[in-house]
Every structure is written in structure tokens, then in C-alpha cells.
Amino acid sequence: MDRALSVAALLDPTRQVVPFHGRESELRSLALWRDSPVPQASLLLHGPAGAGKTRLLQHFRDEHWADEEHGRLLVVDDADRLPWQDVFRQLQDTLRHGPARTRVLLAARTTGWWWSSTRQRIADFDHEVTAVELAPTLDGREESFTLACQHFAKHLDVTAPDEPPPNIAQETVLDLHVAALTVVHGDPCDVNRTQLLRQLLQRDDGPATGRLAEDHLAVATPATPDPDLLARAAQRWPALRPRLDELITGDPGVVHVMAPDSLRIAAEIGSCATVEAIARKIFRDERFATDALPSILTRRLAERAEDVLDRAEMYGMLSARTMVCGLRQESVEASQAEVACYRELVARDRENRPLLADALGDLGLRLINAHRNDEVLAVSEEAIDLWREIAEDDPETVPQLASALEQISYRYQALGRDEDAMTAISRATLLFQELAKNHPALFRADFARVAAAMARRFHVEGNRQHAADSMQLAIANWRVLAQEDPRFEPELARNLVAAGTMLTDLGRAEAASETLKEAVDLFRRLAVANPGTFGKELAEALTHRSKALLELADDVDAALTAREAVMLWRETGDLKGLAAALLNVAQVVGDVGAAEEAVRVYRDLVAQDLVWNQAGLVIALATLVRQQLLHGQDGEALTTADECLDLCRRLPSQLVEFFGANLAPPLQNTARALSDSDHHVRALGMSEFTVGVCEAIRSRTAPTVYLDALQRHVCRLRAAERKEEARDTAHTAVVLWHLAGVELDRHVDYADALTIYGKLCAETRFETGKALRLTHRAVDILREVGEPVKLQFALATAEELSSW
């Protein structure tokens, strides 16, 4: 054993000079958390400095964890000292590889807003998040003190004293060890904490680290203390707080070198002058863009505001900042406080109603962000009613009413209230149309924007003609704007791309190709003058046009256009754009090499930022599977499919919801390709996940999207000879069609669902009479809408059912 250890080293929790003991109840809690059935869980162990958090973490990891049995354990000590980005990177690593079962154990001195922000963000990774408070000292403190005396004495080669432990106010485990080391040295230990530290430090001039270094500031009072140490020490030693205030207010530049956790402490305990000094330095500092610090400062400033209007503005700022740093519930509370302030102002003067209406609109956004959907509509509808009332008194506020209607339409859409969403966007469009007619210079751009939004609503609802008409109306207005003012040309080009993409989805390939050609020509001209700004948009427009050309069966031009897009993306150096363009080449040309390169590019992107790129890697792998199957590389395709499915299962639900609309189509196509190649196990895995994706985005898509995924899954089950399961799933699909709220008597996909269910009933000899009636209805629908191929299938199914 090293006999030259300093006082700091002897007390260092990682060295365990005094062996770990006690904490039986905490260990039981950690074991229950470890063994809980949830696949991912995080726990914060928090307690004051010196309570023994590091010792407990180390003991639990070393003695109570086995990777083979329990999965992955990520330990994050001093989590409150780390910027969110550092915690975020470690969490991302748990999604990249390793066992699906993951536990994240964090330790910190405090909770507060930094933890609330971290907790809500960790939950986005589908982790069950809990917190356990660690008692400052052990239950058997006499036994602990005796044990510490024995081990310190053994290390220092002296006789262990036989004394009772001293009484130390607010004692921690470390305080008890400090007292034990003091008495082993032969000094009196029944004194206060300050005297204990002075006695120890007089015996040892070695470097002080950890909590001992912080305590050194309180007893030695150096002239130029380290600002981070001073902040952490001042949290526990109130006598140091004036020195912290003097340091920051005397030299505000020190803020730029202080750690985020130290600044958070100063923001919480500092004087008003300290808070203002920190605020002036950090509000525009990108280091703190996603940190809780700006929110903590704003809260302190809001609490000081005496004027109601000033307080309302501060709460509005607090609401925005808390939302950015993940404090979703706190952002709602701040927004509610803002609304309350404006209600008070309206009670004094009705001229303040627009301020209240704006605040209600912001509160609606905060409620959506906090997933408090049951409260959103009441708030948003109150804002609409208020704007309508204001507009009746003052026609000059009609634009605000139109904007509020546009915003509430998006909220209705997010909540799955499609009819209300369409009504709101229609009213907004009519208002902006009238405003554009009377004041074209002011409102034509707004009208063009909401007309495009209305086209997207029609598209979601499956109303193809109205979608195309509304988009053409939007484009016509953007053309007028661009002719009158060339500064609108980029917006015209972007809307042409959106229109062309929609027309491709609507099956109008020729119109889509012409629209996208116009966008490409416009972006080419813009890129000549400003390649840095418009080069990427040109490349994206080329990618979309290649898809339209492929629909027109113009394979040569489609291939040339797709490859030109790849070339432009290479020139820009944008890896994400390059990967997407390579996938497009793979699909347009059937190039397995392009798909392989896209996968490699996405792997590089995932290494940089997994959260924003993991869905892209899933899409790339799914595309590669299809290309490998087309080129007869079945062995490689199965390996790629396994990796793709593994990544799918690791995707947090938040990412599935966010990227679901992009994930579903390629995964669906890959499931079909695998099924067609008789690789049914993987086809079903891919299909099941796709159904889950479509269910996750169900509220934001047409009802037919989920039903289509379900029916395709039925086909995969039937191909795998799991016919009874396929039949039951087909029956579920039929029931859901009846609940979908669409016109069934003219819906081809509904007729298809009836036919598929009838076919499976025939093949499994199940309720053939009922199935025959449903199939006859399918025949009637298909005759009415004119679908000869599907009609033949329905007639054949009906004949088969009649034979039973």
C-alpha cells in the first residue's frame, strides 16, 4: 500500500481506503430498478456533497452488476456538472450497439431545473426515469466511524483510537471520515466542520481535490479562488456567497470561463446584480442554447419584475426558453403565468386583448409540446374567439384572425380532428384571399402560403382534384409575386418543388415533370448567382424530377437527372443530401452500388449524430435489401435485413413518430420484396414494424394510411401460410374501415379489404356465409368505381365462397 497518500487521496471515494459498507436499503432499491421488466430505465441518485454517491455507484457497478445477466449499464457520475450535450452523446451510444436492455445510472448533488430538463429529454429515449435521494449519512454511524478509524490507522501504521463519533451539524459520510482521520492523527475531533478541515489541512499540503478542494476555500480563503470551485463551495457554505457575487460582478468576463453547472449555482444563489451580470453574458452564448441556465436566470428576473406588463413579457420569454431546453411542463406553467398577467391587463384596459390572444396562442403551442392535448383546443379556441371579437371591433386585425385560424388548423390536424382542421384552414384561406384581393402587396404571399397548406390538407384526405387545384392557385400567386419582385423567385421555386412532388404522389406524372422542370430551371439560374445558397435546393429539385420522369417511364432522363443530383450534392459536401440522392439513384437506376454507398454515408452521419440520422440509416438499409434481392444477392440481403430490423427495434418512439411518414413507405416495399422472395420471417418482422409506425403517426395521416399498412401485413401473413392469423387481422381491418369515417360505398381499398377477408375465410373455411355477403358488397363497389382487375379477384373469391 502507498504510504505517501495525501489527505485528499485518503478521503478519495474512488480509492475506497475505507471499504464500502451499509446502504442496504439503497442497494435494494437499485436492485429492484436493475431487475424491473422495462427494457430501458434511468435513475438519478442525488444527495449532498460527501453523501457517498460515488462510492455507492462504484460498489453497485462492481459487485451487483453482470453484463451477461443484466444488460448494459451506463454510469454518469456528477451528471449535474455535465452539459446536456455530453449526457446526450452518452445516451446516443446506448442506441448504437450492445444489448437492448439498458440501464443509465446518474449521480448528482442537486435536482432542480437541470434535472427536470434532463429527465424529460431522457424519457424521449423511451426510458422509464426515476430518482432516489441518498441520505447524507449512514444509519449505523457509530459503526461506520469505528471502521473508518481502523482503516485509516492501519494505513498510517498507528493505533486505532477508541472514541465515539463527534456531533457534526448536517453531517455527511465524508464529514464522518474527516473526523475519523482527524482523531487518528491525534487531534480533537469534537469540533465544528471548519476546525476539522483546518486541522487536517495543516497536516498535509498535498493537492486538494473534489469536495475537499471546495471546503479548502471556506477555511483557507485564498486571494484568487477558482470560480468553479467557489460556486460549488458557496452552495454549501453561505459565508462564501458574497465572495462569489464580488467575483462575478467585479469581472463579468469570468462568466465565459465558468462551467455551466457553476453558473447554474450562481444563478440560483447569487444576488440580483450577479444574475444580471450572468444574463448579459450568456443569453446570446450558443454554449447555453439548450441548457437550463437561461431559463433559471429568466425565472429570477421575472420574479423581480414589479410592473405587470414587464412581468408578462418576462414570463413569455421564460416560456420560450424553457421549451427550448426541454422543460416542457415548466414552459406551460410560465405561459400560463403570462396569460394570467395579460388577463389582468385586459381587465384594466380592453385594448390589451391582442396581447392576451397572442399569449393564448403561445400557450397552445406549449401544451402541444408538453403532450397535454386535452387542454390544447380549449385554449386555442379561446384565442380564436378573442381574435374574432377583436376583428369585429377593429377590421385592421383581420390578418391576425386569419393567422390564428391557420395555426389552430395545424393543432386540430395534430390531434386527429381532420374535419375541424379543414374548416379552420378553409376559413383562413378565404380571409387571406379577401385580404390579398384588397391589399395584394401586403397579403398575396400569405394567401399563397395558406392555399398550399390547404392543398396539403386535401392531399391527406385523398381529395386529389381539390389538392391539385389549391396547389395550382398557390403557384399562380407565387408567380405573380416573383414577377413583381424577383426576391420572391426562391419561394416560387420552392413551392414549384412542393407542387411537383404532390402531383407525383397524385399520379399526375406529366404535370409533375413540367412543374419540377420549371423549378429546376429557376434554381439553375439562381445557383449561378449564388451557388452556396441555391446549389443544394437545385440538387433536391433534380432528385424530385427524376422520380417524376421515372413515373413517365422516361428511364434515360430519369437516370441522368438522378445522377446529376448526386454530383451536385458531392460538390456541396452535404452528406445527408448526398445519401438521399444516392438512394434515389438506387431506386431510379436499380444501382446496388449506390445503395451501398448511401449506407456508408449514413453510417458516417450516425457516428456524428445518431438521433437525427438513425432513421435515415434504416431507410438506406431497407433500400439496400431490395436492391440486393433484385440482383440475386439473397445472402447479403438477409444480413442487411437483420441489421435493419435490429435498428428498427432500437428506434425510440419519439423518432418513430417524428420520422414515421418517411420510414413507412421504404419499409413496406422491403417487406413486400422479402415476401416475394420467400423470406417470410424477415418480411413479417419488417411488416409488423411498419404497421406500428403507421399506428404511431395515425393522428397526423389519413385513416387509410394505417389501414393500408394493416392490409399489406395481412398479405404478408397469408404468404407465410399463417392464414388464421391473417384472417383475424383482415377482420380487424374491415372493422376499422367501418370506424374510419370515410365514404365506403365508393372506396376501392375498402372493397379490397372485404375481398381479402373473404378470400381468407374461404381458405380457412370460416364463416363463409358472412364472408360471401361482404364479398358481394365488394363486387358492387368495384363495379361502381370501375376497377376491372380488382373486380375479377372479387368475383373469383365470391365464386369460391359459394362453393362451400
Image (cartoon, rainbow, N blue to C red):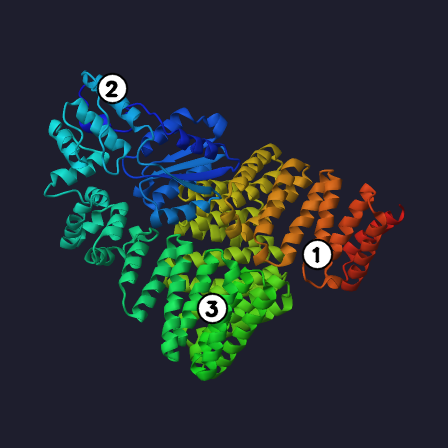
The answer for how far apart the CA atoms under marks 3 and 2 are is 81 Å
Q: Nearer the viewer, mark 1 or mark 3?
A: 1
- Circle 2 packing at 10 Å, graded few (<14), some (14-19), many (20+), is many
- Circle 1 packing at 10 Å, graded few (<14), some (14-19), many (20+), is many
Q: Is residue 636 above or below residue 783?
A: above
Which residue is drawn at the image coordinates 41% and 75% (left, top)? 354
* Mark earlier in primary sequence (1, 2): 2
Q: In the figure, is residue 719 to the left or right of 359?
A: right
Residue 150 is marked as 2
Amino acid type at mark 2 = Gln
Q: Is residue 423 above or below residue 110?
A: below
Cβ–Cβ under 8 Å for marks 3 and 2 = no
The residue to which callout 3 is attached is 492
Amino acid type at mark 1 = Trp
Q: Nearer the viewer, mark 1 or mark 2?
A: 2
* Mark earlier in primary sequence (3, 2): 2
Residue 737 is marked as 1
Amino acid type at mark 3 = Leu
Circle 3: element type: helix
- Circle 3 packing at 10 Å, graded few (<14), some (14-19), many (20+), is many
Q: In the figure, is residue 461 to the left or right of 14?
A: right
Circle 2: element type: helix
Which residue is drawn at the image coordinates 20% and 46% (left, top)? 238
Q: In the figure, is residue 153 to the left or right of 580?
A: left
